[in-house]
């Protein structure tokens, strides 16, 4: 089947990371950290006098009467005021099961485990649209980087429906749209640590592009005129006040 390249207009790219502290106060909690990024994990509400926090029998943190005795590696820190562990420059090897052990008189009185997953964030999204010979539109959505990617599509700011498709489904990376589907198509890609999105304008005619461009120019011109007028008005007001001041002094 012959395919021709369709008109593609990039709309926007948005990316964000997860920055809220993860709640690790319950047994079996799961936290997700961004590769090369940082994460804060809430371990407890009340900090005991003695506790260890370790992974695979390798003690990362020993807390003894308000001070640490051993910190490994230096990328870890603990804030006793809120019972939070902070990890920076996360690596793949930081992922795994961590154990919090609380002691009283050097005797373990309990603890809990949590699991940390490290994921690469979603990178720049590439969106390619092709119009097939029968009028259907094939769209590819991909990211150069990212773990456990999930896809979501929208059309003209509304969720894309399976009924709009010939092949695929709305959570797939590649879809084939029915004939005569047009407007702003956006592919959103996310995982547990980040989200990114990219959009194209499908079947946009030249008139639509020109009208959009002209409208943008008009809006920018109006904003520029308003700013210039306000600045000039403020300057005139300052000059008038200075003249009145000189007249009074005279």
Image (cartoon, rainbow, N blue to C red):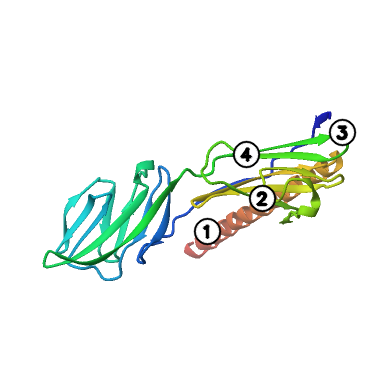
Q: Which residue lies under the disc numbered 4?
A: 142
* Marks 4/2: CA–CA distance: 13 Å
* Marks 4/3: CA–CA distance: 23 Å
Mark 4 or mark 2: which is in front?
2
Q: Residue at x 61, y 56 (%)?
A: 236
Q: Which residue lies under the disc numbered 2?
A: 171
* Marks 1/3: CA–CA distance: 73 Å
Dots 1 and 2: beta carbons under 8 Å? no
Where in the figure is residue 117, as x and y percent of width and height? 42, 50
Q: Secondary structure at mark 3?
A: loop
Q: Which residue lies under the disc numbered 1?
A: 242
User: Could you tell whether 196 is left or right of 40 in the image?
Assistant: right
* Sequence-first disc among 1 and 3: 3
Q: Residue at x 82, y 47 (%)?
A: 182
In the rendered view, tell whether residue 69 sits above or below residue 111: above
Q: Residue at x 56, y 56 (%)?
A: 239
* Sequence-first disc among 1 and 2: 2
Mark 1 or mark 2: which is in front?
2
Residue extending farthest to the top is 2
């Amino acid at each position: 089947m012959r395919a021709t390249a369709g008109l593609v207009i990039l709309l926007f790219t948005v990316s964000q990371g997860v920055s809220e502290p993860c709640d690790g106060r319950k047994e079996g909690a799961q936290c997700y950290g961004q590769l090369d990024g940082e994460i804060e994990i809430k371990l407890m509400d009340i900090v005991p006098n003695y506790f260890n926090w370790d992974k695979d029998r390798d003690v990362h943190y020993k807390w003894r009467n308000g001070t640490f005795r051993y910190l490994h590696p230096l990328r870890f820190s603990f804030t006793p005021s809120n019972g939070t562990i902070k990890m920076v420059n996360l690596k793949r090897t930081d992922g795994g099961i961590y154990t919090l052990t609380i002691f009283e008189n050097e005797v373990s009185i309990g603890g809990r485990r949590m699991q940390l997953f490290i994921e690469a964030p979603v990178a720049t999204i590439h969106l390619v649209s092709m119009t097939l010979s029968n009028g259907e539109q094939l769209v590819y959505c991909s990211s150069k980087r990212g773990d456990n990617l999930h896809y979501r599509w929208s059309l003209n700011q509304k969720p894309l429906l399976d009924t709009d498709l010939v092949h695929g489904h709305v959570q797939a990376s590649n879809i084939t749209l029915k004939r005569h589907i047009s407007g702003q198509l956006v592919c959103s890609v996310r995982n547990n640590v980040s989200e990114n999105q990219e959009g194209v304008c499908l079947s946009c005619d030249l008139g639509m592009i020109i009208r959009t461009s002209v409208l943008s120019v008009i809006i920018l011109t109006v904003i520029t005129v308003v700013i210039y007028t306000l600045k000039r008005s403020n300057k005139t007001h300052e000059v008038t006040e200075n003249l009145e001041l000189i007249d009074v002094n005279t």
